[in-house]
Image: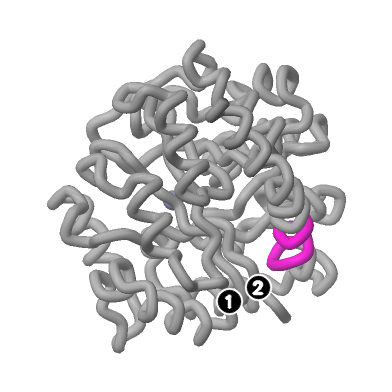
Amino acid sequence: MKIIDFHVHAGKFELLRDDIQELLTRRPMESNVNIAEVFSQPEILENYLTSNGIHRAVLLAECGPGTNYTIDSQMIAEFVQNKDMFIPFGSINPNYHDTKDEFWKSIKLGIKGFKFYPADHSFNALREDMQFVYKMCESLGLPVMFHTGLTAQKDTEQQFINPLDFQPLAETYPDLVLILAHGGKPHWYEEARTMALSFPNVYIDTALIDPLSLEQAFPDLEKLSQKIIFGSDWPVVGSYSNLLEQYRQANIAESIICAIFYQNAERILNDALKKQQDSVPQALIAMSV
Ligand SMILES: [Zn+2]
C-alpha cells in the first residue's frame, strides 16, 4: 500500500530552541536513528521515510518561538530541492511577518501550501491581515493546515485550538482546502468531525491521534473516512515504525486505511498542484505589472 504523510517536520535541528531539542531527543526512536541527522538532512530523511514505506511527505515550516523563528518557508523550500517525494508547506506568523510580503515570498520559493499555528504563535486566526492569505490560497489552490487541539508548547496560551473556531473561515472561503491538524486532540474530536462533515473542503489529519483509539475518537470512521488524512507528526510522534505497527494493531478496515493513508491525500495534492500549475505563474505575472 502506498502512503502519503501529510505532517512531517524538518529543518535544522540545532536551530530549535533548547527545550524543544530536549523534548524531541527524549522521544523513543528506532535504535539506529539519530533524530538530529534525520531532521536536518534531506537524503537521510528521504531514506528514513522511504524505508518505512512512505511515498510522499508534506514538510512543514514552523516560523515561531519554538524554532527560534528559523524554520521558515525559505528553509523548507531549500530542504526539498531535487527531492520529488517532499511537498513544501510554508508558515506565516502574523506576529512576526508582514503577511502579504511573506505570502508572495513563499509563493516565489515554490511553497505549495501552508501550516499556521495560531496557538503556538499566539494569534487570532480570524485577524484581518490573515484574510488576504486565505483568500489567495483559495484562489490559487494552496491547501492550508491549522494546528488544533492542545499544544505542547509550554509558553503559549491554549487559544484557537478548537476545530469550531475555524468555522468562519470554512464559510467565508468555501474553495479553500482547510486541514484541521490533530483533529482537535484530545478533547474536541466531535467538533472536528462536525466541521469535516459540514464542509466539503475541511479535512482532519491524524497527527498525534493514537491509532488504537482512532475509531473511538471518530466512532463512525467509515462515514468520515473520505475526510481524514494520515499525518505522522514525525519527529514529535517518535519511532515511525512503531507508529505504523500501532496502525496494524488497530485493525481498521482495509478500505478505510487506504483512504486515510493514500487516496484522500493524493486527491487533495493532485487537485492542488494541478490548479497551482496555471494559477501561480499567472498571479506572479499579474503582481509584477
Ligand atoms: Zn506537527
Q: Which residue is mark 2?
A: 3
User: What's the magenta bit mostly, secondary-structure-wise?
Assistant: helix
Residue bearing mark 1: 54
Q: Is residue 263 magenta?
A: yes
Q: Is residue 147 above or below residue 56?
A: above
| Callout 1: SS | strand
Q: Is residue 241 above or below residue 117?
A: below
Q: Earlier in the sequence, mark 2 or mark 1?
A: 2
Residues in magenta?
260-267
**Looking at the image, which residue sits at the far left?**
18
Quadrant containing the C terminus is top right
In the image, is 140 to the left or to the right of 33? right
Image x and y of residue 238, in percent: 38, 68
Viewed as shown, does residue 286 lie left or right of 148?
Answer: right
Whether 84 is among the magenta residues is no
* Residue plotted at (33% across, 24% down): 157
Residues under numbered marks 2 and 1 in contact, where contact means CB atoms less than 8 Å apart: yes
Q: Residue 201: horizontal and vertical position, in percent?
A: 77, 37
Near mark 2 (Cα within 10 A), the count class, few <14, some 14-19 or many ≥20, is: many
- Looking at the picture, does residue 248 appear above or below residue 233? below
Q: Residue at x 35, y 82 (%)?
A: 30
**Gap between marks 2 and 1, in whole Å?**
5 Å
Left of 100 or right of it: where is 134? right
Indicate the amino acid at tag 2. Answer: Ile
The residue drawn where x is 72% and y is 18% is: 172
